[in-house]
Image: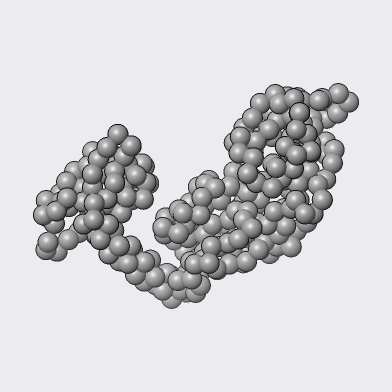
Amino acid sequence: MHNINWNLLRYALFTYRKGSASKASEVLNVTHATVIRSLKKLEEESGVRLFNKSSTGYAATPHGKSLIETAEKIESMIYQWERSVGSDRDSPSGVLKITTTEAVMNYLICPYIHKFYEKFPDIELSLTTSDDFKNISNYEYDIAIRSTPEPPEHLIGRKVFNVDWCTYVAHDCAQGSDHWIGYSNTSQLPARWMVERFPSAKISLKASSIVSMVAATKNGLGKALLPSFIGEHEKGLLELERLDRQYSTELWMLYHKEARGCANTQAFTRWFYQMFGGAT
């Protein structure tokens, strides 16, 4: 293998991480055909088979796994270099990629982002919603903001605030709704409270999206368990009960150790904490 192209390695890296060429193409913002051609070219140049394709996706061969390990080291070095260059700039500028949840995006970032741009007009924020830390662990994003009881050890940052949870109902239904809007995933502590407290609750619908739950609640489909920072912003909702603090969750803002001195990262994390740090 001679003079291997980093872009070819990236196609292999994201195909491995996502398990398919189509999902890799979405992350890399290229066509599915481009990923397929690049993988084929990489295998031709290396002279070995890197992936086995099946009905469930792409699985790396032993040679492929060895290549992925090398690609991850290169990726980390490139990311570290990019962050060091960013720390040398006189003022924060350029693209800052942030991954967070729907709730944080819609109720904490978007309503106040104009205040950030007043201070840092040369930073371009790229915002994506996801509930998975893998995306930032793989250097797809610079900052992750989400609830977690145990932040990953390889990331640094700080807790922004404790998230209190309350039950809400639409003002128009305050006197009579006995139906609930449930969570598709009941593994989180607040959702488990609902299952334990109301095991025989009449569920009108279940949703994986908090934004969808808010819309369903406002339209009178039932009561819902929501973060208090959402209920306090929604005029159409009436708070019924606030859960004990033992059911609170922690909102964390995390980033890579390599980005500790990056001007863009520090600009956003300081602004966000000044806006919301210590709330509730």
259 or 74, nearer to the observer:
74
Return the x and y of residue 257 as percentages of the image width and height.
48, 71
Return the x and y of residue 163 as percentages of the image width and height.
72, 53
Figure quadrant of residue 10: bottom left
| Left or right of 157 on screen, residue 202 | right
Q: Quadrant of the N terminus?
A: bottom left
Res 29 seen here: no
Instruction: Name the residue located 21 percent from the left edge and 51 percent from the top edge.
Output: 50
| In this view, 144 is above or below 74 | above
Figure quadrant of residue 203: top right
Figure quadrant of residue 182: top right
| In this view, 78 is above or below 106 | below
Instruction: Name the residue located 83 percent from the left edge and 39 percent from the top edge.
Output: 239
Res 193 seen here: yes
Return the x and y of residue 155 as percentages of the image width and height.
52, 66
| Left or right of 105 on screen, residue 63 | left
45 or 113, nearer to the observer:
45
126 or 208, nearer to the observer:
208
| In this view, 162 is above or below 33 | below
